[in-house]
Structure formats: structure tokens, C-alpha cells
Image (cartoon, rainbow, N blue to C red):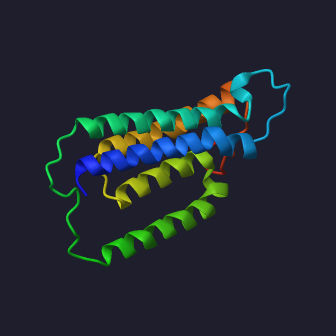
Amino acid sequence: MTQRQVQLRLGFGALLAAIFLAVYAIPAWVSSPSNVGNVILSPLFWPYALSGFTGLAGLGLVFSGLRLEDTGTPVNTPSENPNAAWLRLAGMAVIMGLTMIALPRLGMVLTSMLIFGATAFLVRTRHPVTAVFCAVIIPLVLYAFFAHVAGVAIPQGNILRLP
């Protein structure tokens, strides 16, 4: 597949997923009480927000795919080692198992940082500095929002207690 084909297929897939979520899945499977005072705390807000962000990302992918010229060169070259995919799959299984073990001991924030970083390096990211930065900042920002703005208790571990 060429870069243009990848962009278009991912874009249309994201658009279809967003439409499915907004039209069928969220109304059918997410229940919300009618007396929620703050719209951000409604159980419907974040699913619809994620559906909207998915649709916007899909539109961006479709438009960027339409702007690309079709060079005919494939995106990925075949791997020399066909067992590498199985090794990455096994590595992902180990990371998932370690997540279950580490979550009650380290807490959700620290475990998320470690697992995000480990997954980024498992898939050999081309942007390791950005991956480490995001692995640290995103869980901290999410913790700050949910713990201090939304008032939702985030599981803390035995090693690190966040304020």
C-alpha cells in the first residue's frame, strides 16, 4: 500500500468509527442520569468528545491523503526476520501482564507512565524523546484534571502518593 492509500483508508475508517459511536453505540450503551449538573461530569460527554475527535482526525487523514501524490512506492518494506512480529506480540503480552501486576502497587499514574514508555520503545518509535515526554506529561495532566477538577479518585500506589 502506498502512503496515500494508507491515509485514505485510515481516514475513512476513523470517520466510520466516529459515526458508529455517535449514532448507535453511545446512545445505546452509555446511560446517563438526567440530573447531572456539570456537563463535563456527564457520562455522555467524554464518549461524544472522543467520537468528535475521531471524526476530526479522520477528516484530516482523508484531506491529507487526497493532497498526496500517489508515487506507487510501498509504505513498509517486508521484514527480514518474520519472527519479529511474534516477538513484539509476546512483548506486548508481557507489558499487559506487568500492567496488571504493577497497577495496585505503583498506582495508575506511575504505571501509565512506565507502560506508555515501554510500549513506545517496543514498537520502535521514530520519536523517542517525544514518547518519553508524553509518557510523563499526559498521565500527570490527566491525574490533575480528574483528581482536582472533576473530583474523581485516581488509584494511588504504595510507592508514590500524588497530592
Q: Residue at x 80, y 21 (%)?
A: 37
Left or right? Give the position of 3 relative to 159.
left
- Residue 31 location (% of width, % of height): 79, 40
Left or right? Give the position of 62 relative to 97.
left
Q: Quadrant of the C terminus?
A: top right
Is 2 above or below relative to 11? below
Q: Residue at x 35, y 59 (%)?
A: 123
- Residue 55 location (% of width, % of height): 49, 36
Q: Is residue 126 visible?
A: no
Q: Nearer the viewer, residue 30 or 116?
A: 30
Q: Residue furthest top?
A: 37
- Residue 108 location (% of width, % of height): 61, 48
Q: Nearer the viewer, residue 57 or 139?
A: 57
Q: Residue at x 57, y 67 (%)?
A: 97
Is 90 above or below relative to 137? below
Q: Quadrant of residue 78?
A: bottom left
Is 35 above or below relative to 21? above
Q: Residue at x 63, y 49 (%)?
A: 107
Q: Quadrant of the N terminus?
A: bottom left
